[in-house]
Amino acid sequence: MDLNAIELFLRVVECNSFSAAAEKTGVSTSSVSRKISELEASLNIQLLERTTRKLRLTEKGRIFFEQTHPAMQTLSAARLNLQDDSHETAGTLRISVPSGLEESLIIPFLADFQTQYPEVCLKVLATGSNLKFVEDGIDLALRVGELQDSCHIAHTLLEYTHILVASPEYIKLNTALKTPEDLTQHKTICATNWHNDARWFFTKNHRVSVFELNESLSLNHYAAMQLAAEKNMGIAELPSVNCKLAIEQGSLIPVLSNYSLRVYNQEKLKLSIIYSANRYNSLLIKIFKNFCIEYFKKYRLQATP
């Protein structure tokens, strides 16, 4: 069986397009179509239904995809393990990461990676924008939220929430906070939003409530928001992964923890590693991706009570 044809089939399914898969793999659309047809002939089954407007997996095609996708990943990992890392892991990786998670998640991870792979130069850009891989010269990205482009490959690394926190001193000196309605009596530290009023969205018992805030301070970086909360300046909304250590050390205390905060219309946010499908066979990207997945697997285990 032609492994290259299977690889192309997987890319077509992931991109939901022959032309997009061809662009990402660097071959012509006609070559992709021919390879898929040859694969179908060798299997004596139809994998894809093709029309002028859409592409759809047949039931047997779906089964074939589900069985070959993990198998090809295993084969790729085996090939990777047989190669000599001492000669193949030197190089440069350009990585986009979400602004605000650098101190709590990104830098500790990158430090561990460079300890194991000191010959790799990492060029990291922290930004709130989703950079484009080709136009902006990005090899990989760590991003929060759902994957928007089906021609990219994503692996979920971590799920986390946003929570409200305040310093013990602030809580001691201010009105008791039992429900979101009590926030009107408190100072709040919010993420900067120039164009809209500050709002927090709460969920309890599957009901969503919206509260407009009388914000006393707004900042555009989570580290600054956390420091402001630790300096008794009010109640801050922060990613749980950012303030985990501060809570353990007692410099911050969660408030309204019987309510769930919704951010980007979600209670849980995903941190994923994303890379372009046409870089799927890059050894350096595979090494970084595999290291990243294993690192955050251990992180999740350590975070579990």
Image (cartoon, helix red, strand yellow):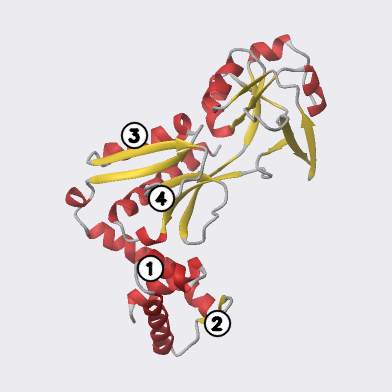
Q: Which of the marked residues, 3 or 4, is nearer the chain's N terminus?
A: 3
Q: In the image, residue 56 lies at what x, y percent? A: 57, 76
Give the residue at mark 1: 72
Q: In which quarter of the image is the C terminus?
A: top right
Residue 219 seen: yes
The amino acid beneath tag 2 is: Glu
Residue 205 seen: no
Q: What element carries label 1?
A: helix
Q: Residue at x 67, y 17 (%)?
A: 234
Q: In which quarter of the image is the N terminus?
A: bottom left
Q: Residue at x 42, y 49 (%)?
A: 293
Question: From mark 1 to mark 4, how far is it between C-alphas?
Answer: 29 Å
Question: From mark 4 to mark 2, how far is it between C-alphas?
Answer: 33 Å
Give the residue at mark 3: 111
Of 276 and 58, nearer the camera is 276
Q: In the image, residue 24 lies at what x, y percent? A: 40, 64
Of 178 and 286, nearer the camera is 286
Question: From mark 3 to mark 1, how far is it between C-alphas?
Answer: 30 Å
Looking at the image, which residue sits at the far top?
Answer: 173
Of 291 and 303, nearer the camera is 291
Count all numbered tags in the image, as a single digit: 4
| Viewer-side label of 2, 3 | 2
Q: How crowded is mark 3: few (under 14 residues within 10 Å), some or many (20 or more)?
A: few
Q: Residue 49 carries which label?
A: 2
